[in-house]
Image (tube, rainbow, N blue to C red):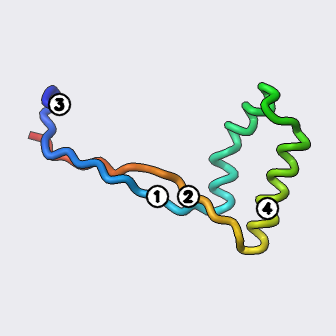
């Protein structure tokens, strides 16, 4: 990053636990596209979402979102 005059760059991977509601919001666009491109049918999507919802109601739903924290020093 010499052109940006940034040194001591560090990248640390992190996983963030997300709620069922956030997971469903995050998936919305991808699932909408999958339906549009006929990657899966409406009934397949319904069954999958129904299964996730039941897991959530039973306290068995777990999701995480991978990410990174990047730090550095501006010269």
Query: Would you call the spot at circle 3 few (<14 residues within 10 Å), some (14-19), or many (20 or more)?
Result: few
Q: CA distance from mark 3 to mark 2?
A: 32 Å
Q: Is residue 32 left or right of residue 16?
A: right
Q: CA distance from mark 2 to mark 1?
A: 6 Å
Question: Which badge, 3 or 2, comes first in the chain's sequence?
Answer: 3
Q: Which residue is mark 4?
A: 53
Question: Which badge, 3 or 4, comes first in the chain's sequence?
Answer: 3
Name the residue rendered at 53%, 53% in the picture.
65
Q: Which residue is mark 3?
A: 4
Q: Mark 3: which secondary structure? A: helix
**Image location of residue 41, percent across then percent down:** 87, 36
Q: Are marks 4 and 1 in contact (CB under 8 Å)?
A: no
**Image location of residue 75, percent across then percent down:** 8, 40
Q: Is residue 64 left or right of residue 34?
A: left
Question: Which badge, 2 or 1, comes first in the chain's sequence?
Answer: 1
Q: Mark 2: which secondary structure? A: strand
Q: Is residue 73 left or right of residue 20?
A: left
Name the residue rendered at 81%, 51% in the picture.
48
**Image location of residue 31, percent across then percent down:** 73, 39
Question: Which badge, 4 or 1, comes first in the chain's sequence?
Answer: 1
Q: Are marks 2 and 1 in contact (CB under 8 Å)?
A: yes
């Amino acid at each position: 990053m010499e052109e940006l005059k940034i040194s001591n760059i560090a990248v640390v991977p992190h996983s963030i636990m997300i709620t069922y509601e956030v997971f469903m919001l995050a998936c919305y666009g991808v699932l909408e596209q999958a339906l549009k491109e006929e990657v899966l049918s409406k009934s397949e999507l319904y069954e999958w979402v129904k299964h996730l919802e039941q897991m959530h109601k039973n306290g068995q739903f777990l999701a995480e979102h991978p990410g990174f924290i990047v730090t550095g020093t501006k010269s």
